Image (spheres, grey):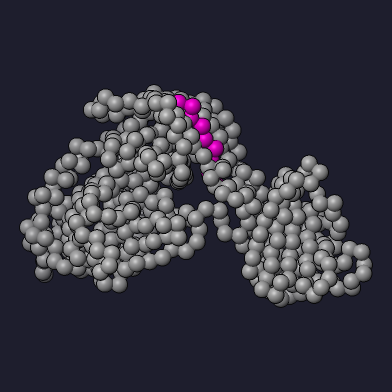
Amino acid sequence: MKKFQLLNWILVSFIIFQFSSCENEPLEGDFVTDICSSTASDGYLVAKVNSFNFRHELPAEGVYGNDGASVIIHENGFTHLNISALVGESEQVMLEIINPSLGTHILSTVNETGLVGNQNNHEFLESFGYYQPVFGSTTEYPYVTYSPRDGVGVVDITLFDEENQLVSGTFSFNANRAKRDPISGEIENDSSGNPIIEIIEISCGSFNNVPFVYGLSGPGTGNPQNEFFAKVDGEDFIASDVSTSRTDVSDISMVKIVAVNEEGQEIRIDLPEELGTGTFAMEELSDGTKVIGLYNPNVGGEHLTSNPGTITITKFNTNTGVIEATFEFTATDPIGVDPTVAEITEGSFSIDYILSSGDLLNTITADVDGDFFDPDTIVIEETFYNGVTRISAIAIDTPNNRKLGIFFPKNIEVGTYEMEAILDLGDEKFSQFTPDIGVSITYTSIPGTLTITEYDPDTGIIEGTFSYTAVDILNQDPTIFEITNGDFVLDLD
């Protein structure tokens, strides 16, 4: 059983060959007619699931990932097409195609579920094929074109009419999943202790003049959106603007958080950058290096300061810039001139004070045959394999259409490890390089070395180096790539 990631072009050639031999025709009743005999009717998606026919008319107003077709455009310009068909509100065939356009798109993903979060405007999404026997089930797991287990497929888009919002094409893919106990949900192993992998073949697929809707995705293209809330004398303080800055005062790095509401009232929190987590008393007066809370009611006076006050910091990551905390303080005039007293209660915030901190922290660089590999996108995912929680860190060099991935168990410790070529027991460490995404095969580390230099499980920050020779694990392509001077810093939280 193969457990490595690559685009098996023998399989792709076989799938492409199927395109020329499979056509569909509308079915009625119990769907006994072979769909590989004519093209799909307008508005329909048809396919053969193993040996069974699948046919469904897609609604004109589709729901993303549910039933129908959608083109989602994100604020950063990233675009993807989702086509999902439900039969009897149970059986589901779904296609996810990034950057849709006329031509052939490879369905292959390193994410076992295919789906990724939207915190980066889905720019880490990969094209994939998906089959769910029971839609919406929490116990029935989907089949996905998961490349580490040779899942792969192709979609050939023959019509992409953005003006009239119609799309046509053909598709076919092989998808897989780990077999699970229907009661416990645990992965079942074979007699050798390896997970039993179930495979499903989707062939003769086509969709014809399927209507799609446009969708716009909101913000979330990098740093977490700053959030701030408090009550002032029992009234909600709703921040309309939250700004952060970092300055050095007397050789102490300070973080200043300023929240302003629509009435111009202001709450400010000053924190030393090396404060860490815990509960801390706020000062009434500060030389610029103390923990302090300030409030300005915007009535022409000076800031009122914390006397007394406390802040409880649950997260303070100086690498990512993310701070999460709760606070409360009584705001008074520190010199006793203004008799105003304001009670600041139920305060909380989640902010990121380092601009583009995700790019500064989550980095993977290397030399590929002496050419510097400097990605513009990093995606970090957790997967679960054979009882082991694993990390996949994928670096994508978009301008040059190449990617490099590092894979290791999350419970890895500081040390040096030999890389392996396949995922078998679950605790393997390996890396992969794809020189031309969607076109070339993926080359795997044989041999290679991964060194973890620092790892703090509490913060999730891990640092290390790597080097390896990337080869075709099937020995069909003699091309090799020398990956040297590999270096990474990742936030696994």
Q: Does 233 sit left or right of 220 as displayed?
A: right
Magenta stretch, main secondary structure class = strand
Rendering coords of residue 461 (x, y %): 58, 40
Q: Does 361 sit left or right of 98 as displayed?
A: right
Q: Which residues are magenta?
A: 483-493
Vertical relation: 275 (above or below) 305: above
Task: Indicate the quadrant where residue 29 lies.
Answer: bottom left
Task: Indicate the quadrant where residue 189 lies.
Answer: top left
- Residue 487 belongs to the span the image colors magenta: yes
Q: Does 369 sit left or right of 493 as displayed?
A: left
Is 247 in front, or is 138?
247
* Residue 16 visible in the displayed image: yes
- Residue 208 belongs to the span the image colors magenta: no
Is 197 in front, or is 253?
253
- Residue at 34% across, 67% down: 214
- Residue at 24% across, 60% down: 160
- Residue at 89% across, 73% down: 339
Vertical relation: 221 (above or below) 195: below
